[in-house]
Amino acid sequence: MLDENNVTEQSYVLYSMYSTSASLCRNLLINGTAVKFQIDTGASFSVMNKKTFVEKVNIPLKPSSKVLKTYTGENVQICGEVEVVVTDDVKSATLPLVVVERGGPLLLGRDWIQHLYVDLRINTIDSHDKKLQKLLEDHGSVFKSAAGCLFDVKVTLHGKPDTTPKFYRARQPPYALREAIEEELSRLQRDGIVEPVDHSDWATPIVPVQKRDGTVRICGDYKITVNKVCKGDNHPIPRIEDLAYSLSGGDKFTKLDLSHAYTQLQLDEESRKYTTINTHKGLFTYHCLCFGISAAPGIFQRTMEGVFRHVPGCVNYLDDVYVTGKNDEDHLRNLHKVLSICEEKGLSLRRDKCEFMQQEVTFLGYRLDKNGVYPLTDKIKSIRDAPTPRNTQEFRSFHGLVNFYGKFIPNVSQVLAPLYQLLRQGQRWCWSKAQESAFSKIKSVLSSDKVLVHFKPENEIVLVCDVSPTGVGAILTQPDDHGHERPVAYASRALNTAERNYSQIDREGLALIFAVKKFHKYLAGRHFTLVTDHKPLLGLFGEGKSIPEHASARVQRWAITLSVYSYTLQHRPGRENSADALSRLPLPYTPDEEDETYDINCVPEEVNFLFSLVDQALLSAKDIAKETQEDIT
């Protein structure tokens, strides 16, 4: 235990490091590895001895300013501190860990307890909690960050009839990245993901994306090869109604995340030719379904439905597998079946992204609990919490949004009358109680079912994006029976300091990425129209455009991100852009909100890796000069 009496802020006394008395312990995953800790409510922070650290974690340490002493006054040598990903039965968090030289039990201190909701009621632990913990321990082999491999199924990419093979020469990478690319190719070969080939009728150039640790991610530019000629998989992605029906009658809910999603599926021999990449080290063919192939979502959904089809109370939505039961016993029985199938068939799960036996789960903008399905307020937050306009320009943007959806608002002119006064010629800006009341009323109407519609996967999807000098905004819409675009959800946020310094075209590109990331679960596996008011983007991200070879790292990452979606990029003049108001009246920027918006845990792996990178250079003018000169907006 850590005793803080009579010691300085950074000095602590450890007098339970060698205790032999009975202790309450907790099994946790540290960076994916199982470790047993002794719960110590007197400890300010959590401690691990060096021997265990080297065996279980073994990552670089940072210096520590803390001073530790034993109960008898001896100094305890500190090796350093480190941030680790800690996962318990229900959640995960990145937390600090102090590593000491000497042995002794591993201490789970108050800093971890408050994040992990450790139950300290020793004699009242629920029997079902124990059964869940035992179940997860029994199936511990399925929880790993590395991709698994579905043993008994091979999937097929279907080329269109009379398809002419597409062969692109290798792009010469920067000299500074060559060694990292070669190391990554070697790793992929060792892991059985790719193999070198001497000849191929198909070849896709690669775009190497550098990660924070200096390694690279190798991405095929399949947008210009495979995606043009391979048939899409028309297997339906589940609708909200399908998910709700499959999980109805459940008391609690578990959500499992399949590691690396598509790469767990093996390709048949004939399909592998389509995935061949051309590098400065030669041709390599993938053995598995890989990132960037537009048919992948439908293939993955169909395959996973087949894998889990005999398990009651189970349904999957792409890489998320949901499990429930009419009571805890039934739930645990169904969960056991799912985990057993994963073990038998070679599938792996990301433990840090799984949630077990929760009272509710969320998907596609809805919250599901044992009583029913409810729309989330997040999808209207950008309208509901939109700040008051500060000048005529900001109000005109909001007025444009109201006009765009005014046809669905009863008595819109009457509601807006106090606001229309601000648009009169020569009218001085004056925001009074009358304007504030009208503003609140119209926001309420825009957020109501008079305007908003429920998402229907079978209908066309239009995603409208915009950016201003201060914020980004997006509206997910679907046409109604009369062809009018009706909003499904709104999203916005303010730009941070760095983003405000972006060039105009970089800000416009950011709006696209913000929108597809925010609404990924709606878009994955479906074709949609992506709307921008900045015409030069069509030259960079338009349908069939290759990933720009000499563009900035940021633009290359964005192009790769967009390549995993099936979309048509459409230009719409600014005056017709319904998202303009959201970008000019964005929700405030906060670090927490930014983390949520760009949380790499909320989307499949083919998008995850792109947003874990650090933005660096701005877009090169050389690559966009032509499009910018032709822009009339």
Image (tube, rainbow, N blue to C red):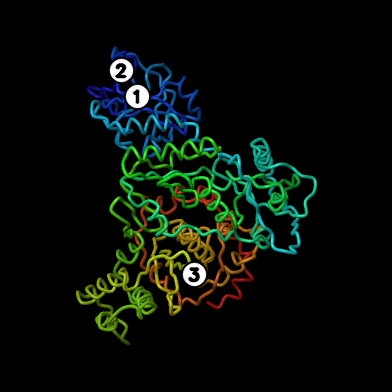
Q: Which residue is mark 2?
A: 16
In the visual, does 252 lie left or right of 505? left
Callout 2–callout 1 Cβ contact below 8 Å: yes
> Callout 3: few (<14), some (14-19), or many (20+) C-alpha neighbours within 10 Å?
some
Q: How many marks?
A: 3
Q: Position of residue 543 (x, y in %)?
A: 61, 66
Q: Nearer the viewer, residue 274 or 397?
A: 274
The answer, for residue 619, to whether it is visible in the render is yes
Establish if 279 lies above or below 53.
below
* Residue for point 76% across, 46% down: 282
Mark nearer the N terminus (2 vs 1) = 2
- Residue matched to label 1: 107
Compared with 598, 453 (above or below) is below
Residue under circle 3?
Answer: 460
Vertical arrangement, residue 298 with respect to residue 280, above or below: below
Q: Are marks 3 and 2 in contact (CB under 8 Å)?
A: no
Q: Separation of disc 3 and disc 1 at Cα?
A: 54 Å
**Identity of the residue furthest to the bottom in this view:** 425
Residue sitting nearer the eye, 569 or 450: 450
**Marks 3 and 2, the one that precedes in the sequence:** 2
Residue 277 percent location from the top left of the image: 70, 50
Of residues 488 and 141, the one drawn nearer to the viewer in this rendering: 141
Tell me the crowding category of disc 2: few under 14, some 14 to 19, or many 20 or more residues within 10 angstroms, Cα based.
Answer: many
Residue lying at 52% horizontally and 39% vertically, measured from the top left: 348
Looking at the rendered structure, the secondary structure element under dot 3 is loop
Q: Looking at the image, which residue is at 37% across and 51% down? A: 247
How far apart are labels 2 and 1 at the CA level?
9 Å
Task: Looking at this view, name the residue that lies furthest to the right.
Answer: 199
| Kind of residue sitting beneath label 2 | Ser
Residue at the limit of the structure toward the left, as seen here: 433
- Please report the residue visible at 32 percent of the width from the left and 39 percent of the height from the top: 328
Amino acid bearing label 1: Leu
